[in-house]
Structure formats: structure tokens, C-alpha cells
Image (tube, helix red, strand yellow):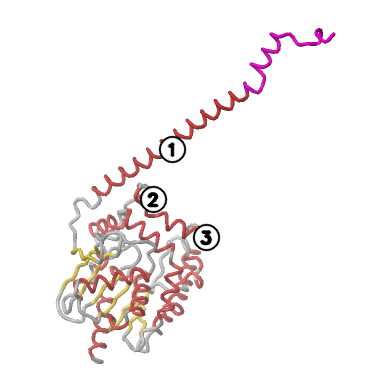
Amino acid sequence: MLASLRMPAPLIGRYSSTHGPMCLNEKVLRLGKAAKWIALAGVAGLLGLILAGIIYEQLGRRKDLVGITRIGESVDIGGRALNLYCAGTGSPTVVLESGTNNPGLAWLRVQPKIAETTRACWYDRAGDGWSDPGPFPRTAASIAVDLHSLLTNAKLPGPFIMVGHSFGGTILRVYSGMYPKDVAGVVLVDAWHEDEIKKIPNRKGPGPPDSLRPAIDRLTPALTFIGFVRLLRPPLKTRPPKGLSREDWRVIQELRRQPKALAAESSTGMTQDESGMQARSAGGLGDRPLVVLTAGKAEYDPSNATEAKLANDEQQIWIHDLQAQLATLSTRGKQLTVNSTHGIPWEAPENVVDAVREVIAATASTR
């Protein structure tokens, strides 16, 4: 009876080899090996892309600025160098600080006129123009430390007349707080104010959420090294802004489009809030002479009436609130509204030159 209930041996064998646990294990092993090879192929592909990106970036750097004559000289500030260009003789020395992502060359319409009567110097911040990249993040304070090292190592005598355009004005406010004995007087040229976005929300440009900015800032040097930032470079604009020739505009754009410059600009933008707090903490200028030049004209599409009205209304806040506040940083502060848009250094350079000369005269009367 028991013998008749037994499963035939051949059937047992077929069941074990094709449907039992042994077969399942083999399938799992095969799937595991396939997944391993897929993962290895993915890693190899990723490494290949990274290597290709590194090569692409290095080849690109060799071609950057080909045919553009360097202006200035390298000054070592401790393992890296900043580019400095001075013209003229005499004292006090005038130091020109550019706006965000603008090389020092953006002062080309201002420096020669100042140099007729005294020494005038511009420089390229770390990553900009012909300067080496610097450590991240690029806050106003870290840039101010670089500037102090540059002026010291270049053996330029102070105290200085400091002139800052846009975000450059924020840097000089922080510099004045950190090194007050270095600063004899200041000219702020349509300088950024830390409350701008709070008072004029529409001026906040596109960007990642604030929570992601620190992580992106930390990744930017690596993304630059593997060529990713180069892929995002903006195209050249053929029409120059008012006051600049096509050739001058082309050179400035080529300097601005370098990946190292774009990376520095990104870091400056990512840490703007921190720089604003640094500027506020720096305090005022005491009784040192200060001239605040303010753009009197808004930038907008003239064919859009709604945009034009909004831009003009916002410009009134900029002129009569934010810029007026900057003039109170000194007991000898003065605000002048200029018939220009934000690009005062090239649209209305004579106003900058006159302001510098006024501050120099004011410092001479107190020596």
C-alpha cells in the first residue's frame, strides 16, 4: 500500500531540478551577477563621463582668453595670485572694486581719468579676470581679507580712497569695518543694499531654494573641475551697453564667461544673505568722507507700459529709501542721483571721477 503511494523516481528528479529551491538559488545568482555587471558598467560609464568632462574643461581653459592681452600683474597672496593693475602716481591711492562677476577691467572708463592726478588701481577678485580661483564660499568678508592681503603684498601705501560698484560697495563696507585704518574715504556707486530684496521683492532673480544653497556652493568647485559649469556658459551678447565699445564689451564678456568666474559669481549669489549680515555688522564710517552715487534711471522694456511703471516705482524706493540709508553711514555722507542706469562706471564715468576727487579733497582738509 505504501509503495503504491510513492512518487515515481523520475518525477521526483524532474521536480527537484526544474521547480525546487536549487533552481531558485541559481536564478538569484544569475540575477545578482547581472546586476553586478550592470552596476559596474554604470560606474565605468560615470567615470568615463567625468574623465571626458575633465579633459573638456582643461582643453577649454587653454582656449580661454586666446587673443586677449593680459592687463595687470600677478600678486601672490599666499599660494594663489590676484591680478592687479595700477596707473598714475601720487597719493592717496584709489582702489576700485567692481560689481558681481565684473572684472577689474570694467573700470576702463574711470581709471585713466583718476590716474591723471593720483594713483588708481583695480584688481580682479579671486576667480574673476586673470586672478586664480579662491576658496569657497565667496562672501564679502572672505573677499575683503583677499583685498587686504593684496594691498599689503603689493606694498601699496594707505590709507586708501575706496570706490565700490554694486556688490563691490558691500565688500568695501565690510572692509572698512575690518580694516578701518586703511580707509580714508569711500565712494559707493549704486551699491547693493542688504534690504533690497525685502523692500523690492521683484528684484530677486531665479535660483535654487535657500535650503539647497549651501550644498550647491560646496559642490560648485567640483562641478567646475569636471566641465559642468562650462556647459552652462551664457552666449556672447553682441550689443554693448551704453558707454562701451563692441571690442571692450567682448573682452569683458570673455572674462566673465570663464568657468572660474561663473563659479565665483554663483558662490557670491548663494551667500548674499551672509554678506548682507556682514555689511550690517561692519557698522558705519564715522566721519570719513562718503559720496553715494545712485542710478536715477530704471532698466525696463520700453514697449511694456506695465513693466515700465513698476520699474520706475521700484527705482523711487531704491533712490529715496535704500540708497539714502547708505548715505547715513557717515556723518559726512552725501547722496547724488546720476542720470544713468545701474552701469554708472561706463555710462557716466565722469560722475565717478568727480565724486572721487571730491572725497580726496575732503580727506586733504582733515589731514
- The residue wearing badge 3 is 211
Amino acid at circle 1: Val
Residue lying at the far bottom of the rendered structure: 366
**CB contact under 8 Å: marks 3 and 2:** no
Amino acid at circle 3: Ser
Q: Position of residue 281 (x, y in %)?
A: 43, 78
Towards the viewer: 214 or 163:
214
Which quarter of the figure is the C terminus placed in? bottom left
Q: Position of residue 17 (x, y in %)?
A: 64, 16
Disc nearest the viewer among 1 and 3? 1
- The residue wearing badge 2 is 223
Could you tell which of marks 1 and 3 lies nearer the N-terminus?
1
**Residue 98 in the figure: left or right of residue 43:** left
Q: Vertical placement of 335 versus 268: above or below?
A: below
- Which type of secondary structure does the marked residue at label 3 adopt? helix
Q: CA distance from mark 3 to mark 2?
A: 19 Å
- The residue wearing badge 1 is 43
Q: Is residue 4 magenta?
A: yes
- Which type of secondary structure does the marked residue at label 1 adopt? helix
Tell me which corner region of the image, top left, top right, bottom left or bottom right, holds residue 359: bottom left
Residue at 32%, 73% (x, y): give it: 164
**Residue 144 in the figure: left or right of residue 110:** right
**What secondary structure prevails in the magenta region?**
helix
Magenta stretch, residue numbers:
1-23
**CB contact under 8 Å: marks 1 and 3:** no
Amino acid at circle 2: Leu
